[in-house]
Amino acid sequence: MKKQDFVNQLSEKIKMPKKITNDIVDEFSSLIMQALKSGDEVGLSIGKFQLKKREARIGTNPSNGQRILVAPKVVPSFKPSKAFKTTVLE
């Protein structure tokens, strides 16, 4: 489902104009990104958005097979709630 399809369905469900619904979806996404950027977790009924730390590791360059050091980094992740997993996997 593309964003516009999501906005269209949501606007029909909540009976609001598509423009306002699109602004709400954009602001919702922005708030999640801002919270993660500041180091906070965002818990919703569908799950939790959070940052995870990945440790440094030894990797392999696929083009030449040479071993390289992959630097540690922080990546965004989503941990689905039990209800979310149950609903999606039914």
Image (cartoon, rainbow, N blue to C red):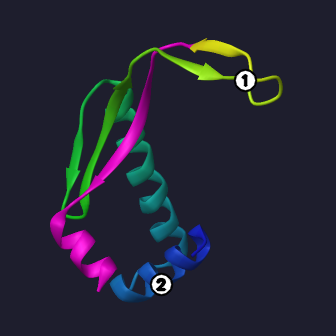
Q: Residue 84 in magenta?
A: yes
In the foreground, 35 or 60 = 60
Can you say whether 74 is above or below 83 in the image?
A: above
In the image, residue 15 lies at what x, y percent?
38, 86
* Image quarter (top left, top right, bottom left or bottom right) of the C terminus: bottom left
Q: Which mark is residue 61?
A: 1
Judge from the rendering whether residue 72 lies leftward or rightward of residue 67; answer left or right: left
Q: Which residue is mark 2?
A: 9
Farthest residue toward the right? Answer: 63
Q: Which mark is residue 10?
A: none
In the image, residue 39 lies at what x, y percent?
29, 25
Image quadrant of residue 60?
top right
Q: Residues within 10 Å of mark 2 (few under 14, many from 20)?
A: some
Can you say whether 11 is above or below 27 in the image?
A: below
* Image quarter (top left, top right, bottom left or bottom right) of the N terminus: bottom right
Q: Residues within 10 Å of mark 1 (few under 14, many from 20)?
A: few
**Callouts 2 and 1 close, C-beta under 8 Å:** no
Can you say whether 42 is above or below 72 in the image?
A: below
Image quadrant of residue 33?
top left
Q: Residue 64 in magenta?
A: no
Chain part drawn in magenta: 70-90
**Which amino acid type is shown beneath numbered disc 2?**
Gln
Q: Residue at x 57, y 68 (%)?
A: 3
In the image, residue 62 lies at what x, y percent?
75, 30
**Which amino acid type is shown beneath numbered disc 1?**
Asn
Q: Residue at x 44, y 31 (%)?
A: 75
Q: Residue at x 33, y 31 (%)?
A: 52
User: Label 1's element?
Assistant: loop
Can you say whether 47 is above or below 36 in the image?
A: below
User: Label 2's element?
Assistant: helix
Judge from the rendering whether residue 42 lies leftward or rightward of residue 53; answer left or right: left
